[in-house]
């Protein structure tokens, strides 16, 4: 953890912050805030000591460590035949064994229930009163789990970008695939209507499809990556399908995606390349993310036939992307993983909790809006605030002033907007 003291003389208490992931480091956000990044609002900084969390297995908290050569071994997540499927499973098995060897028994205990119990232990160890918490994306799952375990120890719990752990992984995949493709198509529409878009005047959807198809046959060079060594030197169509999701997380970065596609068409796909691990616990290596997800979610894939059935589902709900999404990396990345699922999906049961605030955008490319509706249903004391707009989460996104103000006001006072409030942010 990392703590930044309140700037005001009379703080309300401490605000625990988790940025999501899983595998995201809250300490990095708090450190950035200390350098003037303005992650948090002036009011929040004035009234709270902000505590950035690195949950178990993440960042500064005994991170999951894995063999970087195995993290970097490139296998297709859309295998076309039995040989490619066996290669995927063998990589997963070898990677999991390396993580177990380098991490130790902790690897089997980085699930979200364990992390929520750690959060309570940390609250007590710091002598804090009732919990104030802001969780983004996966951080919403951590917060909801805490509410189930310790409902009477909450003062304020803000969940921004809701992840619904009651769903099967297949249902999760279906919803996220649809949400991501919706966001990508909205990006194409934005580019067609916005002169400042780098691809204005271009049929961007057609360009994207052609680029992916070409890169599937002949990967595009990424010379910046080849020189720096921190991302892949060649970019496939599969890489592009997955990379675009990250560039759609914040509407302010839409033109970054347009520029990346423009550069890739010109022969330089560096901006669409996947990062590579430079060490066993590299923040970009995703070892922590894989380990946590494979303890929290099940995969029904046992055979190539199983995978192809799910791929057809992805193609049905997202014909352009074919189901490329973070959920697909769970379904395929956990095949053959050596650690058993410790915290499988199930409906959450929260009783006697104070008011909980849930916020979600209607066109979030990562945490689909229906997840927020279901989490709101499962948390009887929750109030859902809907942001009519694009992008993943609201607190960190530019131009989401009403939603961000609602979160800040709730954290400070415990008061929420009226139920079913919708902001056009």
Image: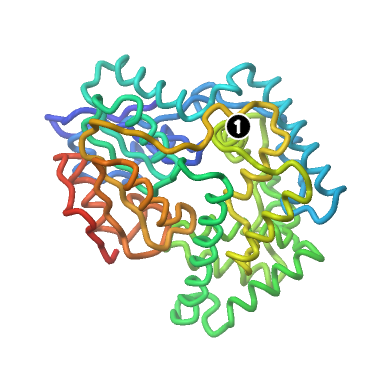
In the image: residue 130, left or right of residue 363: left
Compare residues 400 and 110 and report the one nearer the observer.
110
- Residue 353: percent from left, percent from top: 24, 32
Q: Which residue is mark 1?
A: 291
- Residue 303: percent from left, percent from top: 77, 44
In the image: residue 136, left or right of residue 203: left
| Picture residue at 58% right of the left edge, 77% below the top | 204
- Residue 305: percent from left, percent from top: 77, 51
| Picture residue at 64% right of the left edge, 76% below the top | 207
- Residue 240: percent from left, percent from top: 65, 61
- Considering only vertical position in the picture, is 113 above or below 301? above
- Give the number of callouts: 1
Quadrant including the N terminus: top left
Quarter location, residue 109: top right
In the image: residue 406, left or right of residue 204: left
Q: Is residue 226 visible?
A: no
- Considering only vertical position in the picture, is 346 above or below 331? above
Compare residues 174 and 278 and report the one nearer the observer.
174
- Considering only vertical position in the picture, is 69 above or below 197? above
Instruction: Find the residue positioned furthest to the bottom.
Output: 201
| Picture residue at 59% right of the left edge, 54% below the top | 325
Quadrant including the C terminus: bottom left
Disc 1 secondary structure class: helix
């Amino acid at each position: 953890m990392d703590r930044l003291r309140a700037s005001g003389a009379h703080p309300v208490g401490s605000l625990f912050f988790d940025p999501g992931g899983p595998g995201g480091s809250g300490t990095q956000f708090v450190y950035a805030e200390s350098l003037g990044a303005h992650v948090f609002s002036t009011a929040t900084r004035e009234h709270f000591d902000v505590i950035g969390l690195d949950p178990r297995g993440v960042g500064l908290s005994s991170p999951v460590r894995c063999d970087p050569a195995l993290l970097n071994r490139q296998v297709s997540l859309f295998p076309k035949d039995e040989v490619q499927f066996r290669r995927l499973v063998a990589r997963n098995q070898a990677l999991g064994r390396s993580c177990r060897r380098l991490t130790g028994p902790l690897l089997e205990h980085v699930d979200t229930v364990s992390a929520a119990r750690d959060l309570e232990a940390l609250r007590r160890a710091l002598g804090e009163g009732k919990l104030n918490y802001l969780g983004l994306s996966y951080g919403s799952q951590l917060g909801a789990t805490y509410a189930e375990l310790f409902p009477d120890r909450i003062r304020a719990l803000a969940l921004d970008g809701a992840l619904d752990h009651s769903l099967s992984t297949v249902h999760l995949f279906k919803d996220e695939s649809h949400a991501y493709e919706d966001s990508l198509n909205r990006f194409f529409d934005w580019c067609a209507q916005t002169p400042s878009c780098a691809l204005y005047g271009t049929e961007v959807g057609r360009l994207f499809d052609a680029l992916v198809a070409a890169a599937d046959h002949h990967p595009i060079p990424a010379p910046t990556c080849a020189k720096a060594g921190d991302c892949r030197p060649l970019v496939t169509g599969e890489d592009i399908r997955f990379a675009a999701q990250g560039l759609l997380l914040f509407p302010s970065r839409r033109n970054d995606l347009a520029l990346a596609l423009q550069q890739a068409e010109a022969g330089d796909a560096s901006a669409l390349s996947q990062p590579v691990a430079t060490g066993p616990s590299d923040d970009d290596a995703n070892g922590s993310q894989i380990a946590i997800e494979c303890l929290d979610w099940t995969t029904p894939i046992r055979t190539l036939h199983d995978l192809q059935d799910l791929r057809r589902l992805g193609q049905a709900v997202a014909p352009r992307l074919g189901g490329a999404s973070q959920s697909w990396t769970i379904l395929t990345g956990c095949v053959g993983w050596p650690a058993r699922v410790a915290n499988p999906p199930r409906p959450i049961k929260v009783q006697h909790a104070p008011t909980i605030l849930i916020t979600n955008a209607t066109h979030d490319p990562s945490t689909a809006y229906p997840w927020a509706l279901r989490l709101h249903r499962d948390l009887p004391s929750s109030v859902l605030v809907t942001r009519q707009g694009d992008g993943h989460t609201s607190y960190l996104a530019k131009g989401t002033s009403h939603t961000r103000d609602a979160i800040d006001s709730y954290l400070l006072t415990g008061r929420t907007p009226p139920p079913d409030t919708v902001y056009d942010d």
